[in-house]
Amino acid sequence: MAPRTLKSKAFRIDCIIPYSRGLILGCEKGKIYAYERTPAENVVYKLQQKRISSKYRDQPRKIEIKKAAITQMVLNSTEDVLYYIDRNNQLLKVSLALDGTDPESTVSEYVHGPFHH
């Protein structure tokens, strides 16, 4: 599989995690992509929803945080919340709609608040 963005440009994958229907990729510049398995032989995975970017963070104290590569990811048991750590050692979470019901709900926020700046 050679993952591509919607503009067909290659990107670097920093970490990957499987979920029940496919794969979630943590990529360069803090971008997260959810891919879903397909039955087609020529397209094994398709982009499930638009990319999620760690730049869409809840910033309660108006702290400027640059997007950074995702280093680790884990899903909760119901696969609707993704927790991740970026290269700035920030622990964040994002609600996912991997069933395609609400792709607009994907906004990253801090688990406890910003730290390690």
Image: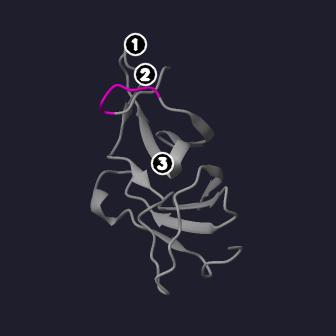
Mark 2 is surrounded, within 10 Å at the Cα level, by few (under 14), some (14 to 19) or many (20 or more) other residues, namely few
* Residue 104 against residue 18 in the figure, above or below: below
* Inter-mark Cα distance, 1 to 2: 6 Å
Which type of secondary structure does the marked residue at label 3 adopt? Answer: strand
Which of 76 and 86 lies nearest the eye of the viewer? 86
Q: Are marks 3 and 1 in contact (CB under 8 Å)?
A: no
Task: Say which residue label 1 marks.
Answer: 41
Label 3: which residue?
Answer: 32
Q: Earlier in the sequence, mark 3 or mark 1?
A: 3
Query: What is the number of the mark on residue 44?
Result: 2
Q: Is residue 105 above or below residue 68?
A: below
> Which label sits in the foreground, 2 or 3?
3
Name the amino acid type tagged 1.
Answer: Glu
| Cβ–Cβ under 8 Å for marks 1 and 2 | yes
Label 2 to label 3: alpha-carbon separation: 19 Å
Could you tell me residue 107's position as x and y percent? Answer: 40, 66
Task: Please state which amino acid type lies under the numbered disc 2.
Answer: Val
Q: Identify the residue shown where x is 61% and y is 78%.
A: 114
Image location (x, y in percent) of residue 27: 54, 42
The reply, left or right, for residue 41 in relation to residue 116 is left
Q: Quadrant of residue 18?
A: top right
Marks 2 and 3 close (CB-CB < 8 Å): no
Is residue 36 shown above or below 3? Answer: below
Amino acid type, mark 3: Ile
Element at label 1: loop
Magenta span covers which residues?
6-10
